Image (tube, rainbow, N blue to C red):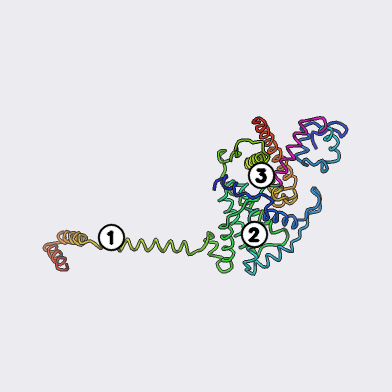
Amino acid sequence: MSGTTPSKSMMDLEAFEALLDAHGHDARVWPDDLRPSAERLLIMSPEARELLSQDTVLRAELDHLPFIQASGDLKARILTAFNRNPEMGLLEMLWPFGPLWRPVAGLVAVAAFGIYLGMGPLNPTTSQPEANLALGDEIVILGQSDGENMGVIAFAEIEGTE
Amino acid sequence: MSATTAVLRLERAETALGAETRRSSRSVCQTNDRDGMPREEFDLTDDIALIARLKDGETAASRRLVDMHLNRLVSYAYRMLNDMAEAEDVAQETFVRLWRNLDSWRPERPLLHWLQRVTHNLCIDRLRKRKPVSIDSVPDPVHHGFSPADDVYREELSAAIEAAIQELPDRQRSAILFCHQEGYSNIETAEIMEISVEAVESLLARGRRSLRKQLAQLRQELEGDL
């Protein structure tokens, strides 16, 4: 290891920290050629002992990092994906977010609402009497522009149908 | 979901599921000498049987697999991404990929390693797309005011370490999580991360040093409060 001194001398703090980084706080797993000088440093240096203490605490905490509980909803989604996989491979690839009926139902609902708006009572061109008059006016104007008496005839025809 | 809410959902490692899954991982992966060769050998009997049942469409097998590994995948993804919704998306995507690729799985490495590699790669992909990360997105340690009581000190310490892990560079964080949260050897970690063992050692050393400095700083703060 770089920065280390011969085993008979005392290791410096930087080398000791590198030793901790590489091998941890357990002196039993330290390399044989470094252990004696590291142990001498530990006896002499409170800073080294503090480093060792920090490493011990840190590794204990890291080794006991808790697992996070996944939501039940996530588990259900994953299992649903498995159940659908054999028969719906292609659809699953196209829509991997859950049951396919939901987006389909959404599209159908939107389409139905659009048709309703287009044909229903809210459409002024199909539901209001004024709409027929407006249409009649347009035909009269067109008829008048075409030649003599055409507009009168067209207007009379419209009136006759009402 | 906020980080605080997610932290509230943490379960200590001693809970039945956590302890069980951690033990099962270690029993599957039989580690040889820490620095040693030859390569590790794995007992894949359970994995092979499980995959065969999954190929037959057995929902019980899928439930068992999800029960065994979901929390650990979510935990890894959450600590990598610091976002619970994204972590759950990644875990779901990992399992969906497995469902789609059951036929192509080869019994060379433990199934869990495959799952963790996919999770790791998905996290790295998301982190790359997300860069640069605002410093504001890194959670501060949760300070409730210091009390000399041990449990409060431990709570403070755990929160500080969780926050410090989030601040590590991505690859250092991965190495630390695989080595400590999952209990893998450097060789296994290298295999999952698809890098050399030397690179793992370097990442671990830098990551631990950085975390130790954070810990030292926290200790000074706590002692200053006394």
Q: Is residue B54 above or below residue B75?
A: below
Q: In which quarter of the view is residue B114 placed? A: bottom right
Give SS at disc 1. Answer: loop
- What residue would you read off at disc 1? A123
Foreground residue among A28 and A134: A28
Identify the mark nearer the N-term, 3 or 2. 2
Give SS at disc 3. Answer: helix
Q: Quadrant of the N terminus of chain A?
A: top right
Foreground residue among B11 and B32: B11
Which circle marks residue B67 in the picture?
2
- What residue would you read off at disc 3? B173
- Residue A115, percent from left and from top: 34, 63
Between the residue at mark 3 and the residue at mark 1, the CA separation in whole angstroms equals 61 Å
Identify which amino acid the numbered label 2 is placed on.
Asp
Same chain, labels 1 and 2 = no
Identify which amino acid the numbered label 1 is placed on.
Asn
- Residue A65, percent from left and from top: 67, 47
- Residue A24, percent from left and from top: 77, 41
